Image (cartoon, grey):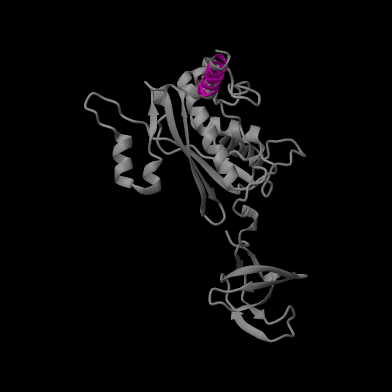
Amino acid sequence: MRRIAVAASAALVLAMSTIPAAADPTAGQQNERRESQIPVCSHRLGTVAVVEPDHDWWSEYHLGSPEALIKVLVMRSGCFGLVDRGKGMAAIERERAIASEGELRQGSNIGKGQMKAADYVLVPDIISKNNNASGSNIGGLLGGLVGGVAGGVIAGININDKTADVVLTITDVRSSEQVAMEEGHAKKTDVSFGGGIGGGGWSGFGAMGAGSYANTEIGQVITQAYIDAYARLVNDLGGLPGAQGVAPSDAAASQAVAMTRPGRMYERPSEKSHVVRRLDSGMMLYPTGNKDGVWWEVKDELGNSGWVSSLSFHLAK
């Protein structure tokens, strides 16, 4: 009898040990509430301008432009320096216009050559589904027409289920190369409404113009989806610790120059060296990055290489 009792006890312990952890309601809730943290980069990836998408999908959900939301993510992550090319830029232009009319006091120091360039342009986007009685689904239709990777990101928002699929696209300003595009997904169970998103919670979202995303359930779901996409994006660019990303924008080719007057391209940085070719006013040249005093090594559009005095050209616009 003792052997039977021991065997029964062992069987009971074994059965209890094989019960899935998800059967515990507390563990299940923890698994469902996988609130995303705004990623923090190990170093700056450059400067970025956040641009509003062409089509307004957010007004339908009583939300503000996602431009403000993405700016919050950029500021908190430390992954990029942020330059304003939106409403702030319009205000700057008005201030510069006042300065050019001589209305500002002496020493205001507002003028040309001080504005920082954007290395990247970041566009947040989403396409909403049309859940009407006829069953028409614009997002699904476009997804079928586009196909491939681009078609896969056309998923949108489902108000009833509180799910969101978004896409972030980042483009190198100098090369115009689209260096990364990432999808993000979130659902209601990813968000504890009003509970915050970690790393400072929802505080500051209102001050940055993204309060509607913090104050509504669907807004919080969309925010989580953008955080998901943003984390993937900065990882692609090598911003997160241990990530192997693309080369930074400042490694792009040097800006082209244009001759301001007729001149010559020399074999070496000296007017006494052999002349490679004559150069006409307005001709475009491409610096290699090598310099010797006022002399720059350049290439022309035919592949000729030589040295030209920087006194005879300017940066092409």
Residue at image position (33%, 47%) is 147
Residue 153 horizontal/vertical position (percent): 41, 40
Residue 244 located left or right of residue 182: right
Q: Residue furthest left?
A: 134
Helix, strand or loop for the magenta stretch, by majority? helix
In depth, the one of 139 and 109 nearer the eye is 139
In depth, the one of 46 and 97 nearer the eye is 46
Taking 28 as reference, is 183 above or below it?
A: below
Residue 143 horizontal/vertical position (percent): 33, 41
Count of picture labels: 0
Residue 49 in view: yes
Taking 296 as reference, is 20 above or below it?
A: above
Q: Which residues are magenta?
A: 5-20
Residue 264 horizontal/vertical position (percent): 64, 79
Taking 69 as reference, is 51 above or below it?
A: below
Q: Quadrant of residue 311?
A: bottom right
| Quadrant placement of the C terminus | bottom right
Residue 132 located left or right of residue 174: left
Residue 168 horizontal/vertical position (percent): 49, 40
Residue 191 in view: no
Q: Quadrant of residue 292?
A: bottom right
Residue at image position (40%, 36%) is 55
In depth, the one of 200 and 296 nearer the eye is 200
In depth, the one of 86 and 173 nearer the eye is 173
Residue at image position (70%, 36%) is 104
| Quadrant placement of the N terminus | top right
Whether the magenta-drawn stretch holds residue 15 is answered as yes
